[in-house]
Image: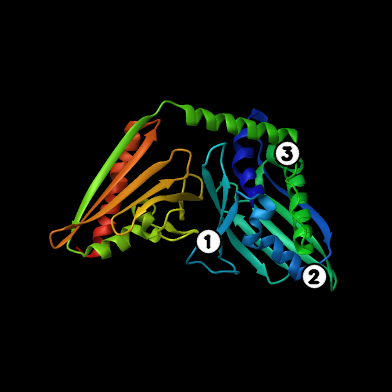
Amino acid sequence: MSVVGWAQGRWQRRALTGSSAQASAPVPFRVERVATIAAPAADALRVLVDPASTPAIEGPDTFTVLVPGRPVGAVGERRCFVRPVGAGAALSGSLQEVVEVDPGRRWASVDLSGSMRLRRSVTAEPVSPDTCLLRVAIEGVGPDGVARHLEGALGPLLDHDLTAAAHLVAGWPPPPPPEPNAMLRRIRAQDEQALWRLVRAPRETVRAHDVVRTSAAPVRAWLAVADARNDCWDDPDPDAVSFTVPGTPPGQVGELRCRVHHGSTGIDGHIAEVMAVDPGEAIVVRERGLVAAVRTTWVAPDGAGTRITREVVVDSPTPEATRLRLAEDLRRWREALVRHLGA
């Protein structure tokens, strides 16, 4: 999954800095690798496309979650691939949508988080009842500079996917990740430097808060503000969805929450973590992005109803723009909460 993510953003921003590459007309490209796997075709295909295989193939700090409300195991399924960003605790998510399923034989997805819309396909061709050819390919359309460089950068990563599949079906430990080639190392180093410049930029603490008074009972208000599915209420994207990452404790410390929405170049996933909970009274959620906002929500009885207070704190390098954004976010949250509670 991360192979597509690297190609989407890094190659466009870093590899195509020369004027000749920028001026070249888009051309189709395809990077493909094939390996013989000692397993039935259906088993080999399953292990490579199973979201549960992500930590073994990509590394223990990565994972894939299925977006609720979409088909599962069929065309239209959406997956959020989450990986670490930089040297801190930040996490970034990219979205893939399944566009082709031939059970036991073929599976394909398209990345929705970048402008290139790269397609990743996995095909298992039976050779015998216990052996198959497993084929992994990435294809798309982009400037000629991309096509010329992708083979050297992505080929070893696709080889690694096939080796990992062979290890997993055999019950062996996953192989170590491949060493990136010189170009990819340079791109990653430049990205790391850019991240550090962002992290070290002068910042100002921005605080914003809002209060909602409602006739709803405190327990009903608490259930609304503590539910991860309602985290998208403050999002400007009307199609945004949010949910608890499976395997993490809903409404408790350590819960990871994923929000999926339209970003500047596609559909992105953002991760937040519940840091503190006083059941029925307060919950603290911290975003796991490079610029992390901390949202604290309090619920308290107010006469015959309930008072709900939310405060958002961000250490921002652009304080004025952040103040305006937070004010709009809180307005959307307040209006959605009032509609939900009916008062």
Are dots 3 and 2 in contact, CB under 8 Å?
Answer: no
Q: Which comes sooner in the sequence, label 1 or label 2?
A: 2
134 over 236 or under it: above or below: below
Where in the figure is residue 263, as x and y percent of width and height?
46, 47
The amino acid type of the residue labelled 3 equals: Pro
Residue 40 badge = 2
Q: Residue at x 61, y 56 (%)?
A: 110
Secondary structure beneath dot 3 equals: loop
C-beta proximity under 8 Å, tags 1 and 2: no
What crowding class fits label 3: few (fewer than 14 Cα within 10 Å), some (14-19), or many (20 or more)?
some
> What amino acid is at disc 1?
Gly
Report if residue 176 is visible in the image. yes
Q: Earlier in the sequence, mark 3 or mark 2?
A: 2
**Residue 119 to residue 14: above or below:** below
For disc 2, the neighbor class at 10 Å (few under 14, some 14 to 19, many from 20) is many
Label 3, label 2: how many angstroms apart (C-alpha)? 31 Å
Which numbered mark, 3 or 1, is in the foreground of this view?
A: 1
Residue where numbered disc 3 is placed: 180
| Depth order, front residue of 68/293 | 293
Distance between the alpha carbons at the discs numbered 3 and 1: 31 Å
Can residue 16 be seen here? no
Name the mark nearer the viewer: 1 or 2. Answer: 1
- The amino acid type of the residue labelled 2 equals Pro
Q: Which residue is label 1 attached to?
A: 247
Which residue sits furthest right?
128
In front of the other: 33 or 343: 343
